[in-house]
Image (spheres, rainbow, N blue to C red):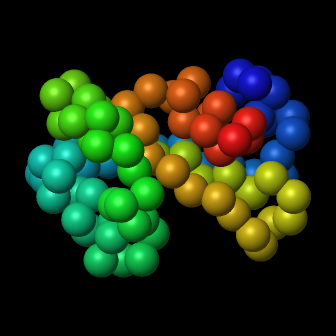
Amino acid sequence: MNLEDLIKKCNNFHLTVNDHRTEYMTVSEYLSKLETQGMLDQEDVHDDVVKKMIENDTLIELQVYPHTPCGFIYTVHYDLQMAIDFLMDG
């Protein structure tokens, strides 16, 4: 599934790229903030994905409402296509 398919399939989604930079945080600091806010359990993110986000200084947040405008699923990644695949295929 690509971004265009996601647009057609889902009720709504939010895509944020590198918001940690607007808050003058490192990727690690931002992930900790997300965990504190209850958006993320860092144990659910594979270590290799976290390592790559830190190496690339890239943090993609994808929040998808696949079936209703109320219930959503959320992930972080360094690669948009991989984030889409993780949420929609897996």
**Residue at the (40%, 66%) spot, across then down:** 41
Left/right of residue 73 with respect to residue 15 in the rendered view? right
Image spot of residue 37 (x, y percent): 36, 77
For the image shown, how many numbered marks are present on the structure? 0
Residue 22 at least partly seen: no
Q: Where does the C terminus fall, quadrant-wise?
A: top right
Image spot of residue 61 (x, y percent): 46, 47
Q: Is residue 63 above or below residue 53?
A: below
**Residue at the (29%, 43%) spot, across then down:** 47
**Residue 8's quadrant in the figure?**
top right
**Residue at the (40%, 50%) spot, across then down:** 45
Q: Observer-nearest residue: 50 or 22?
A: 50
Residue 7 at least partly seen: yes
Image spot of residue 86 (x, y percent): 61, 38
Left/right of residue 44 with respect to residue 66 in the rendered view? left
Q: Where does the N terminus fall, quadrant-wise?
A: top right
**Residue 71's quadrant in the figure?**
bottom right
Q: Is residue 64 above or below residue 35?
A: above
Q: Observer-nearest residue: 41 or 26?
A: 41
**Residue 68's quadrant in the figure?**
bottom right
Q: Is residue 60 above or below residue 73?
A: above
